[in-house]
Image (cartoon, rainbow, N blue to C red):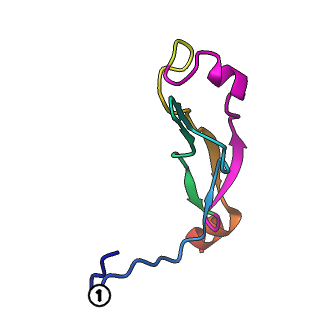
Amino acid sequence: MEFIEGMNLHHSLELISACGYPRYTNFVSGFAGCLDYIYVDRELLNVAKVVPLPCHDDVTMYTALPNVVFPSDHLPLVCELQWSVCSQQSDSG
């Protein structure tokens, strides 16, 4: 690990993963893991809806990704976000 004097690697954001932590978003021959996230600041945004990922049987039907059903080696993460009430009140005041 390299240290660079004066570089601050901290932030005040309260980040959460909007779609949770699925077992995998990438499923290829020899590897399955979660590589994709949608991080949001929980103070500013609320997760309204999350589109569910396909079931494991559907993903593995053709051995690995990509395949004829899923054209990418990554599964898409999709969610609907809303501004939190607190962030809207602070912007208007």
Residue 56 falls within the magenta-colored stretch: yes
Looking at the rendered structure, the secondary structure element under dot 1 is loop
Residue 56, given in percent of the width and then of the height, sits at 70, 28
Q: Which residue is mark 1?
A: 6
Q: Residue furthest top?
A: 68
**Above or below 60: residue 93:** below
Along the viewing direction, whichever of 63 and 89 lies nearer the viewer: 63
**Above or below 84: residue 18:** above
Q: Amino acid at mark 1?
A: Gly
**Above or below 23: residue 56:** above
Q: Residue at x 52, y 24 (%)?
A: 65
Residue 4, given in percent of the width and then of the height, sits at 27, 82
Q: Which residues are magenta?
A: 42-66
Along the viewing direction, whichever of 61 and 81 lies nearer the viewer: 61
Residue 45 falls within the magenta-colored stretch: yes
Residue 72, given in percent of the width and then of the height, sits at 47, 26
64 left or right, relative to 45: left
Dividing the picture into quarters, in which one does residue 59 lie? top right
6 left or right, relative to 87: left
Along the viewing direction, whichever of 32 and 7 lies nearer the viewer: 32
Q: Residue at x 54, y 24 (%)?
A: 64
Dividing the picture into quarters, in which one does residue 34 lie? top right
Along the viewing direction, whichever of 48 and 2 lies nearer the viewer: 2
Dividing the picture into quarters, in which one does residue 80 lie? top right
